[in-house]
């Protein structure tokens, strides 16, 4: 399966949300709740499908996430940085105007993921490597009540899993002197969710949109835990075992508006509210009687403010720019290096080129994380329990390319 | 299409421009860590086993690598510190320590936990270090296991010819720059700019670990250490004179440093692990039988009392009585009035004021005569003096320890040197403490519930490498405060404790 070859990356901002769901809209700060002019609306606001002026619309795109995170703590002379692989979140959208009132949409996209790799570092008992991959398959039905108003309902089929490696604790080593570590692979598991949206177009130059995407909890029941560098005296305890874990994907509510202050200029403003408080803890229950691994997360709900613009040079060329502020869902005292998410300032740029039915779009997102000094408490017995923290700073540069095709 | 390529190229250029690494507003750099008023360029550590990195009953290679001076020097290297050399241990090929002399083992290898047996025992491997494998120093780590204060100034302590007469130390033999150099001469020859001096523990400890079988040279008034036996308490005046001499030598060229105090005897698990009353009785017939066995002795005490040979207090203290529940050990006590003329041994039951030494673990409850299972050590056979540090012996040890610490404090004050209160720290290490990162270490020594929580090793006297990390952090605290230096701490939990093997 193609998933095996793709890593959806970690963009370091809002938890493990990877907001890269359309090259046109990335250029405009990943707004899109009220921009109904291409297949990307199948993700941003499926109610907008009924407002598309082409019968068939297709879009496909991919981004390349190059993220860097640095960590330091002067109390212990710790200085480390991640060696994250290139993340490649993708999407594929199709819309079909079945009747004047009814539109159909299909969206396949990767809204969540994370990929963080720390090598031989001070927080190895929390994470060495983590890679989470989640993709959604979302068929939609939109219905237009009038030229001003439409709604949509969508089913979400979510698939995903996580691979996670951490040391057992800070001191346990195998007889070879290497640290004992656990490798947890959840396998791919599925779950369902839904999406409701509403599009409102009072005038040709003023659009509004609301979208609610439900939470989805992937319930990995058949995970496999293996242990490496196990000392001989623990070889009967740390044996390969099954495990279960729940991975919650938060719900998201979005409200947006777009308008044309002049003929060639489109401005879009979005507000997203993400229900991160669903992520209370990461609990891993082992089937062989090992005590469960519990990491408290206590995420809080977050807001994201986005403003973007598109200027049309001529009938072929579009340039885009945008800015958004993304709030970290991590509560103070729960800041963990497996998803080191700080508040971020995000600057986006885009360029689109239209050729008859085809369009190609480029985007560039520069994500600048705010420096954050925080810690998490690692649970455990005796010296295993401790505070781990320091100062984190990160950024990401994310170019992307998308191709669209439309038929009247 | 060309335009698209231009744009693409443009984006890539922007990408490469901005893809530069994120930067901290205040990154760790060359000026983060500083030596303040101190000069770490040549650090020399002077002391005994605690300075050498001795742990789990011996000095072995990986233990030495985690000695507190080694950990400290690593941190100092971030603030102008230089190379730190430690005595040659590369011939410890099995990483088990111990020592052989002309093929004969003279020191045992390290203690480990044998998971199939549960308790600590010596690892079943042969020591490879030979006394005659001499690699002359001086080294930066001048910690010599077993050294008492007067050994630091003793010429010939490193001469292999003196081993047979026990006037030399096998560790110092291997590391002395020349056979007749003293430890302090070698330390000074290293020309330190900074030093730590932690000495005096063995001057009381050996007396204590021997169960007080040596001589307290304070009550004896003996100020000639060449006449001392290995288990004697060093005379406080001897300690004071030599301590002054040591610090004069170390500071002669203006070096700065830290001195450390000596912990109380009861602050190591060696004396606090076995309770005074480890004999549970749940059967009244057994209680009656035991009491019957001492009827004659108890009656003899009453006779002695009536003849005014002993006081009422002593008679009470010596009367042996067993009850249901936890019972005190029966012990020999040389401080009791000698009633051997009446045929009465000097024995009594232990109290909470007595300390039982750790090795007694293998003796208590054992019936040494297989033909007479009624004779049991600690119950029907009084425990020998060497297994018990009695309350009078404890007083001697405490008086000497207090005297030594007073000398350390006052000479350090006169020299304007900061004092690391290792006495207090080791008490905390035994009782349990929370370190900087919130990790909790407890005192449940040998109860088997959580071996990871311990800072003391299996010999019950020496910290593990994890414990030495706590000690290094204490020195760092003192250095930061006294010299205005800034050094990073180490994380104790990253350091090992002892080996646990499935079988030995």
Image (cartoon, rainbow, N blue to C red):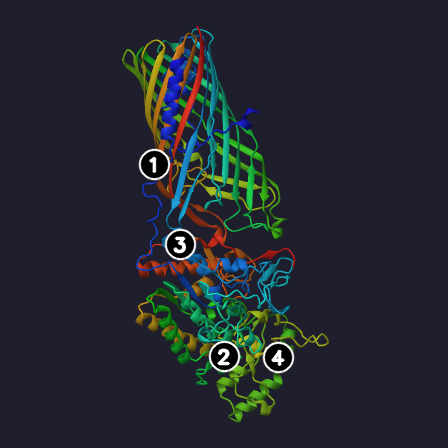
Distance (Cα) linking label 2 and label 3: 40 Å
> To which residue does mark 4 refer?
B291
**Which subunit holds the residue at mark 1?**
A
Q: Quadrant of residue B194?
A: bottom left
Mark whose residue sits in front, 3 or 4: 3
Q: Separation of disc 4 and disc 2 at Cα?
A: 37 Å
Q: Nearer the viewer, residue B324 or A120?
A: A120
Assess disc 1: are there few (<14), some (14-19) or many (≥20) residues with their C-alpha within 10 Å of its C-alpha. some
- Judged from the image, the secondary structure of the residue bearing numbered disc 3 is helix
First of labels 3, 4 by sequence position: 3
Q: Secondary structure at mark 1?
A: loop
Using the image, name the chain to which the residue with label 3 belongs.
B
Q: Quadrant of residue B287?
A: bottom right
How many angstroms separate mark 4 from mark 1 (CA)? 77 Å
Q: Position of residue B159 (x, y in %)?
A: 53, 73
Q: Quadrant of the C terminus of chain B?
A: bottom right
Can residue A26 be seen from the camera position used here?
no
- Residue at the spot of label 3: B77
Is residue B420 toward the left or the right of residue B351 in the image?
A: left
Res B391 visible: yes
Residue A245 placement (x, y as % from top left)? 53, 37
Mark carried by residue B266: none
In what element is the residue under mark 4? helix
Mark 4 touches mark 1? (CB < 8 Å): no
Closer to the N terminus: mark 2 or mark 3?
Answer: 3
Q: Residue furthest right?
A: B371
Q: Are marks 1 and 3 in contact (CB under 8 Å)?
A: no
Considering only order in the chain, which callout, 2 or 4, is on the residue closer to the N terminus? 2
Instruction: Look at mark 1 in the image and give the residue it sits on.
Output: A370
Determine if marks 4 and 2 fall on one subunit. Answer: yes
Label 2 in the same subunit as label 3: yes
According to the picture, the residue beneath numbered tag 2 turns out to be: B232
């Amino acid at each position: 399966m193609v998933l095996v070859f793709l890593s959806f990356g970690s963009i370091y901002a809002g938890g493990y949300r990877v907001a890269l769901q359309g090259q046109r809209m990335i250029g405009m700060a990943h707004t899109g709740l009220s921009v109904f002019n291409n297949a990307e609306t199948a993700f941003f606001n499926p109610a907008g499908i009924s407002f598309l002026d082409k019968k068939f619309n297709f879009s496909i795109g991919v981004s390349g996430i190059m993220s860097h995170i640095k960590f330091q703590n002067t109390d212990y002379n710790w200085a480390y940085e991640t060696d994250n692989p290139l993340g490649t979140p993708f999407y594929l959208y199709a819309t079909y105007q079945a009747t004047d009132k009814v539109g159909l949409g299909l969206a396949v996209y990767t809204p969540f993921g994370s990929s963080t790799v720390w090598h031989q570092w001070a927080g190895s008992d929390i994470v060495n490597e983590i890679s989470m991959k989640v993709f959604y398959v979302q068929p939609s039905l939109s219905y237009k009540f009038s030229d001003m108003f439409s709604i949509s309902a969508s089913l979400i089929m979510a698939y995903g899993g996580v691979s996670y490696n951490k040391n057992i604790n800070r001191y346990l080593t195998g007889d070879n002197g290497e640290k004992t570590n656990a490798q947890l692979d959840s396998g791919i598991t599925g779950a369902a969710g839904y999406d409701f949206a509403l599009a409102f177009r009072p005038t040709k130059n003023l659009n509004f949109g609301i979208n609610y995407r439900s939470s989805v909890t992937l319930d990995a029941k058949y995970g496999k835990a293996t242990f490496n560098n196990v000392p001989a005296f623990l070889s009967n305890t740390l044996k390969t075992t099954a495990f279960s874990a729940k991975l919650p994907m938060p719900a998201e509510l979005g409200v947006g508006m777009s308008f044309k202050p002049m003929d060639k200029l489109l401005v879009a403003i979005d507000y997203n509210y993400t229900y991160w408080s669903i992520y209370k803890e990461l609990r891993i229950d082992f089937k062989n009687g090992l005590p469960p691994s519990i990491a408290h997360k206590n995420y809080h709900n977050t807001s994201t403010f986005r403003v973007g613009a598109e200027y049309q040079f001529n009938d072929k060329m579009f340039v885009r720019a945008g800015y958004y502020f993304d709030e970290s869902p991590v509560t103070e005292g729960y800041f963990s290096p497996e998803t080191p998410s700080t508040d971020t300032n995000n600057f986006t740029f885009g360029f689109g080129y239209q050729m008859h039915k085809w369009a190609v779009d480029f985007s560039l997102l520069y994500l600048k994380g705010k420096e954050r000094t925080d810690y998490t408490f690692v649970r455990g017995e005796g010296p295993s329990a401790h505070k781990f923290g320091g100062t984190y700073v990160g950024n990401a540069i994310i170019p992307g390319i998308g191709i669209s095709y439309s038929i009247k | 299409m060309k335009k698209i390529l231009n744009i693409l190229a443009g984006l890539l250029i922007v990408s490469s421009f901005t893809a530069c690494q994120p930067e901290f507003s205040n990154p760790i750099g060359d000026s983060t860590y500083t030596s303040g008023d101190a000069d770490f360029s040549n650090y020399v550590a002077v002391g005994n086993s605690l300075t050498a990195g001795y742990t789990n009953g011996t000095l072995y290679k990986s233990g030495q690598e985690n000695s507190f001076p080694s950990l400290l020097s690593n941190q100092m290297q971030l603030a102008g510190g230089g190379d730190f050399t430690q005595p040659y241990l590369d011939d410890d090929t099995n990483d088990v320590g111990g020592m052989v002399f002309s093929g004969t083992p003279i020191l045992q290898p390290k203690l480990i936990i044998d998971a199939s047996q549960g308790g600590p025992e010596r690892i079943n491997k042969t020591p490879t270090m030979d006394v005659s494998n001499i690699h002359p120093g001086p080294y930066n780590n001048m910690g010599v296991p077993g050294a008492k204060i007067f050994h630091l100034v003793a010429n010939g302590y490193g001469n292999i010819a003196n081993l047979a007469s026990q006037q030399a130390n096998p560790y110092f033999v291997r590391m002395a720059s020349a056979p007749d150099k003293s430890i302090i001469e070698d330390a000074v020859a290293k020309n330190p700019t900074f030093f730590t001096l932690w000495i005096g523990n063995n001057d009381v400890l050996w007396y204590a670990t021997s169960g007080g079988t040596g001589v307290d040279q304070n009550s004896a008034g003996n100020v000639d250490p060449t006449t001392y036996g290995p288990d004697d308490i060093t005379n406080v005046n001897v300690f004071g004179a030599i301590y002054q001499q040591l610090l004069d030598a170390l500071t002669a060229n203006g070096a700065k440093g830290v001195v450390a105090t000596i912990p109380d005897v009861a602050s190591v698990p060696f004396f606090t692990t076995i309770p005074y009353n480890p004999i549970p009785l749940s059967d009244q017939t057994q209680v009656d039988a035991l009491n019957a066995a001492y009827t004659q002795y108890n009656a003899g005490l009453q006779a002695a009392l009536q003849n005014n040979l002993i006081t009422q207090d002593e008679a009470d203290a010596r009367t042996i009585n067993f009850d249901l529940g936890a019972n005190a050990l029966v012990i020999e006590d040389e401080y009791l009035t000698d009633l051997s003329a009446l045929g009465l041994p000097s024995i009594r039951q232990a109290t909470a004021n007595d300390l039982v030494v750790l090795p007694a673990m293998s003796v208590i409850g054992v019936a040494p005569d297989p033909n007479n299972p009624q004779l049991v050590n600690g119950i029907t056979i009084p425990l020998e003096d060497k297994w018990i540090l009695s309350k009078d012996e404890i007083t001697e040890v405490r008086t000497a320890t207090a005297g030594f610490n007073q000398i350390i404090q006052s000479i350090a004050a006169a020299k304007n040197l900061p004092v690391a209160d290792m006495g207090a720290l080791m008490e905390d290490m035994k009782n349990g403490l929370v370190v900087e990162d919130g990790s909790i270490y407890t005192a449940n020594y040998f109860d088997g519930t959580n071996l990871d929580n311990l800072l003391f090793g299996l010999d019950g006297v020496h910290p593990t490498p994890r414990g030495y990390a706590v000690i290094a952090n204490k020195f760092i605290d003192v250095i930061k405060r006294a010299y205005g230096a800034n050094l990073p701490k180490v994380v104790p939990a990253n350091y090992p404790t002892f080996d646990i093997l499935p079988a030995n």
